[in-house]
Image (cartoon, helix red, strand yellow):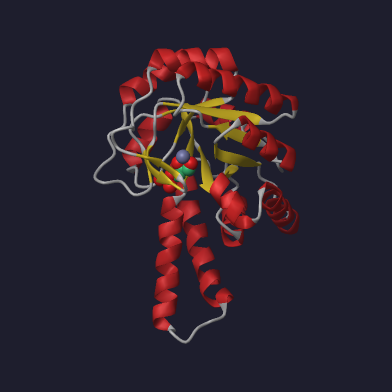
Amino acid sequence: TLVSMKEMLEKAKANGYAVGQFNLNNLEYGQAILQAAEEEKSPVIIGVSEGAARYMGGYKVAVAMIKSLMEEYGTTVPVAIHLDHGSSFQECAKAIHAGFTSVMIDASAQPLEDNIAVTKKVVELAHLHGVSVEAELGRVGGQEDDLIVEDAEAMYAIPAECEQLVQETGVDCFAPALGSVHGPYKGEPNLGFDRMEEIMHLTGVPLVLHGGTGIPTKDIKRAISLGTAKINVNTENQIAQAKKVREVLAEQPELYDPRKYLGPSRDVIKETVIGKMREFGSSNKA
Ligand code: G3H
Ligand code: ZN
C-alpha cells in the first residue's frame, strides 16, 4: 500500500531498524525494488530525484509507473514514493500534486533562516495532503545527479541548528550531514557518531543517512542504534546493474534486444536491494 514515510520511520526508530530508500532510475529499478520489498516483507521508500523524474518524463510518470506496478504485483508492503533532494517549494508542490507520498526539501545550501522558512512552507502544504517531509542541514559531499558538493563545502550539521530547524518546522524526519558522501567513497567514511547521538536526543525525530553506498555494516548498525531510521542507497544499485550489463554484452557482443541485458541487470538490482533490507533489519517488518 502507498503510504507516507511518517509511520514506517517512527516504527523503525522504535524497533531498532532502518527503512531503505532506493532510488528509481527507470522501469527496471521500480520492478526490482518492489519485488525485493514484497519478497522480504519489508517496508520500502522509493526515492525519485528531480533529475531521474525528468529522465522518466516527469513526476506523474514516476507515480503512475509505481502505482501500476504495485497493482500488477498485488503489493502488500508499505511503500512511500519520495521526492529525493527537492530543490524548491515549487518542485515539492509539483511532486505532492503528482501523487508523491513524501518529499525532501533540501535547502541545506541556504542560510539556516532561509532553510527553516522554506521547510515550514513545504511542511504546511505536505501535511495538508498527508505527505511526509524530510529536511537537511550541513552538506552531504559527493555527487548525486546534478547535486554536486565539493569536499570543501561538505560540512557537518550543527546540533543546535538541527534542534531549531526540527522544532520550528515540524518535519517528520531529518538528515543531518555527518560525513557521509553521495556516490563511491574515497576511503572509509568517517561518520560523526557523537553528533548523531546528540542530534537524536535534541530533535527526537527519525534521522536519515544519505550516501548509503559503501558504508560498512558496523557503521550502519551503529547509526541505527543512534536514531537513524532511513538510509538512502542509489550508487550501489547502479554500479551492480552496470557491471551486469557489461558482462552480458561482453559475453554476447551480437546482442541487441534490450530485454536480454536489462532483464538480468534488473535481477542484480533486486538482489542488492534484498541484501540492504537484511542489513538494515527491515526484512519481515512490513
Ligand atoms: O539521496 C540519495 C542517496 O543519498 C544516494 O546515495 O548514491 O551514495 O548511495 P548513494
Ligand atoms: Zn542524498
The image shows a total of numbered marks equal to 0
Residue located 46% across and 18% down the image: 112
Looking at the image, residue 192 lies above or below residue 274: above
- Expressed as whole percent of the image width and height from the top left, the position of residue 222 reads 36, 31
Q: In this view of the protein, which residue sits in the foreground, 270 or 251?
A: 251
Q: Is residue 222 left or right of residue 281?
A: left
Q: Is residue 275 left or right of residue 134?
A: left
Residue located 58% across and 42% down the image: 45
- Expressed as whole percent of the image width and height from the top left, the position of residue 256 reads 53, 82
Q: Can residue 286 be seen in this view?
A: no
Q: Is residue 106 visible?
A: yes
Looking at the image, residue 218 lies above or below residue 32: above
Residue located 52% across and 58% down the image: 270
Q: In this view of the protein, which residue sits in the foreground, 37 or 51?
A: 51
Residue located 47% across and 87% down the image: 254
- Expressed as whole percent of the image width and height from the top left, the position of residue 266 reads 53, 64
Q: Is residue 132 left or right of residue 254?
A: right
- Expressed as whole percent of the image width and height from the top left, the position of residue 73 reads 71, 57
The C terminus is located in which quarter? top right
